[in-house]
Amino acid sequence: MKKNIAICSALFGFIALPSLSFAELPCKSFTHSNAYELSSPILDEISGLAVSRSNGRFLWAHTDSGNSSELYVIDHSGAVFKTYTVKGVQNIDWEDIALGPCAASDARVCIYISDMGDNLFKRADKQILIIEEPDLSGLETPTDEVGELSVIERISVKFPESQAPEQKFANPDCESVMVQPGTAEIYFVSKQSSGGEQSLYHIKKSEAVDGMRTGTPEKLASYEFTSALGSLKPLFNAVTAADFAPDGKRFAVRSYAEVYEYDVESYGSMAEAFAHPTKVFASAELQGESLAYDKDGRSLVTACEKYMLAVATINLFSCDLKNPSPGSGEDPEPGSGEDPEPGGGEDPEPGSGEDPEPGSGEDPEPGGGEDPEPGSGEDPEPGGGEDPEPGSGEDPEPGGGEDPEPGRGEDPEPGGGEDPEPGGGEDPEPGSGEDPEPGGGEDPEPGGGEDPEPGSGEEFDSDLDYHNGSACSIGRYGNPFSLLWLGLVVLMGGAVRMMRKRS
């Protein structure tokens, strides 16, 4: 699998083009930390994701046209913890979901469902459904439990009518929605599947009457996205999801090919920010239609539908901070969601043999073991252990126990068993001061075991199998079916271009 991923990365490294602007965003890069296969078939057509505000361990998810009017509470591995039926509505074409205040300066949090998918550009019943988010704090394990939710408000979205022939997309397909924190203002980006400009809209809401409002989309700006894949097939440049960062200072937009971030704070307005995207990574998910900021406000979560022979998958991208706090000495752990404390960590006692805490900014003492007493006649062993007492008559047994890590300052116990087999067990954390267990089992499979939730700083608590590399995407995750699909797209695109040149 590693070889497969490496080959794919080499083949499609050209996708990672330079950033499109110089706005100062908090992440210097994103690390693709995890990929989880969505094992539940009800999520095969996952079309929207949003992180819960009541319990950041969970995400809200939904599927699109032709599926049930249900919302799913899932964790970051895609396990379904609870299902909610939305009463009295039909899933005509739910395409995205967002969380935000129920109204301006409202302490309540609401779920906003965008029922505005319209591949034929003719729907007159586009709407946004608003539901108050329930408390998820009591959810502990995946269940088949089904609850009910009620819509507290609907916004009927009416595009301005236009009879002009050139206004073919006056009533565009819309597959994204985002709600601005604090203000509850609603924005979305149109989906132009045949290439060309994608437009940012703000919804101007009328006064509510019996829980119903009219929303008139106001076009703020347009931008033509480009990508290496989009040059082969314009659909790859179509926008399929968007989300605001929890502080409202940034927002992100995704296409099938790439993910972009926008700095509203630096540019001063949504329209100006939309004209200056920064490409943060190439997603290249064949049917990627979901995007959300994770609970740390920086890392991103994407998802893609089951497509052809490729499985539906959630992908987690951890933020590598651009500017860690002064005095920290190094970047925090990707996806930890925590800035290191300035000058964090204490200096180790000279010769204590203890490595400083990661992120403390301190270099360990060279050789980090205990210094011998002056004149003691003892030479320290390389790596900081102590020699046996002179005259004790005891030489350490050859191979008796484990060699300490350089700088650990600990001697193996005399006769402490056998050397561990290569790969036997897990390597200790750098500077942890702990020896690996002798013979500690087999090497874990790549990506095996439990990974922490992005941004949680805690070990991810799940008994579910972890599937790294099972993603429905190309290049980055190494799915062979996806690679085959891309090859066909490239061949078809090349043939079409050759035919155009000849004609």
Image (cartoon, rainbow, N blue to C red):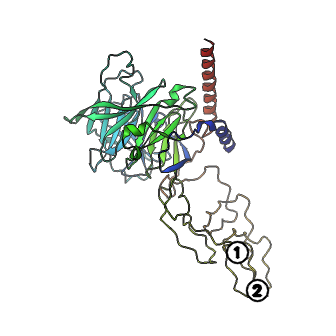
| Badge 1 density bin: few <14, some 14–19, many ≥20, Cα 10 Å | many
Q: Which amino acid type is marked by label 2?
A: Gly
Q: Residue at x 72, y 64 (%)?
A: 420
Q: Residue 269: give its label.
A: none
Q: Counting residues from the N terminus, which is met first, the one under dot 1 or under dot 2?
A: 2
Q: Is any atom of residue 51 visible in this view?
A: no
Residue closer to the observer: 250 or 442: 250
The local secondary structure at tag 1 comes to: loop
Q: Residue at x 47, y 64 (%)?
A: 341
Residue closer to the observer: 57 or 282: 282
* Residue 377, quarter of the rendered image: bottom right
Residue 216 place in picture, x, y as percent? 28, 30
Residue 175 place in picture, x, y as percent? 41, 32
Residue 234 vs 343, above or below: the answer is above
Residue 126 vs 399, above or below: the answer is above
Q: Residue at x 26, y 45 (%)?
A: 104
| Badge 2 density bin: few <14, some 14–19, many ≥20, Cα 10 Å | few
Q: Is any atom of residue 452 visible in this view?
A: yes
Residue closer to the observer: 447 or 171: 171
Residue 95 place in picture, x, y as percent? 40, 33
Residue closer to the observer: 418 or 247: 247
Q: Residue 384: give its label.
A: 1
Q: Which residue is mark 2?
A: 377
Q: Residue at x 41, y 46 (%)?
A: 266
On the rendered image, what quadrant is the N terminus found in? top right
Separation (CA) of disc 1 from disc 2 = 15 Å
Residue 257 vs 412, above or below: the answer is above
The local secondary structure at tag 2 comes to: loop
Residue 119 place in picture, x, y as percent? 42, 24
Q: Which amino acid type is marked by label 1?
A: Gly
